[in-house]
Image: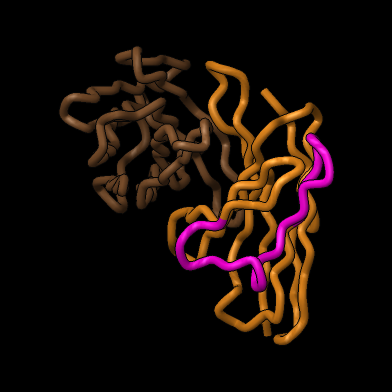
Amino acid sequence: SAVISQKPSRDICQRGTSLTIQCQVDSQVTMMFWYRQQPGQSLTLIATANQGSEATYESGFVIDKFPISRPNLTFSTLTVSNMSPEDSSIYLCSVEGSWGYGYTFGSGTRLTVV
Amino acid sequence: KQEVTQIPAALSVPEGENLVLNCSFTDSAIYNLQWFRQDPGKGLTSLLLIQSSQREQTSGRLNASLDKSSGRSTLYIAASQPGDSATYLCAVALGTSGGYQKVTFGTGTKLQVIP
């Protein structure tokens, strides 16, 4: 299965600023997925990123708040813009493996907004 | 819209006990179902993947079953150990019109194994 390197692993940010999270995959993948996990909650899909096209956002998430880049088949970034304390969460990227391998997740970025 | 529920939300057992975690989903037209483990503040570790055509998968002390018709999956952990303490998540994949699968996560079961 694919190996994902995600960074930063954690950050503490001031409200009103932006943070860009990076995910690097060790193989080429068509789709990459970005999730948010709020404290004590399960994972919620933010958007699906396909190389060469705009990301598809889930209900409740907008591009102005969570812009995503997907410049090639092994890399993607998620930016959390104009942050507020409510954005404090773990953010994870994910890719789908070959048939039989399911989904693989990055180690996550723990974001605290103060 | 797929909804995934896990019962119980939390479970505390003595070491050595066998246990069952439950996952139920509302849309049975699934592509696959995957069980994950998450340690506090960490990412997700895949435990078992069951394709829609399969009924169960086994890995070591873990056994996962799938009954699509009833919308249920169970994760059986044999001879539990303190190192099994974590939150267990089930994730159900459905096909989309875009040709990829969309994954919906369950609410999770927080397991504590007491030495």
Magenta-colored stretch includes residue A69: yes
Colour assigned to chain B in the rendering is: brown
Q: Is residue B115 visible?
A: no
Is B6 magenta? The answer is no
Left/right placement of residue B4 relative to residue A52 reads left
Q: Residue at x 76, y 69 (%)?
A: A11
Q: Nearer the viewer, residue A93 or B112?
A: A93
Q: Is residue B36 above or below residue B66?
A: below
Residue placed most toward the observer, A15 or B20: A15
Q: Is residue B46 above or below residue B41?
A: above
Quadrant location of residue B27? top left
Q: Residue furthest left?
A: B70
State the image coordinates of residue A12 (x, y, percent, origin top left). Answer: 74, 75
Q: Which residue is located at x 41 percent, y 26 percent?
A: B32
Q: Nearer the viewer, residue A61 or B70?
A: A61
Image quadrant in which the N terminus of chain A is located? top right
Span of residues in magenta:
A57-77
**How is the protein colored in the picture?**
by chain
Which image quadrant is residue B25 in?
Answer: top left
Q: Nearer the viewer, residue B19 or A36?
A: A36
Q: Position of residue B22 (x, y in %)?
A: 26, 37
Q: Residue B20 location in percent, x, y?
A: 27, 32
Residue positioned 24% across, 25% down in the render:
B68
Q: Residue at x 79, y 35 (%)?
A: A73
Whether residue B2 is visible: yes
Which quadrant is home to the C terminus of chain A?
bottom right
> Judging from the image, what is the letter of the chain drawn in orange?
A
Q: Position of residue B85 (x, y in %)?
A: 46, 43
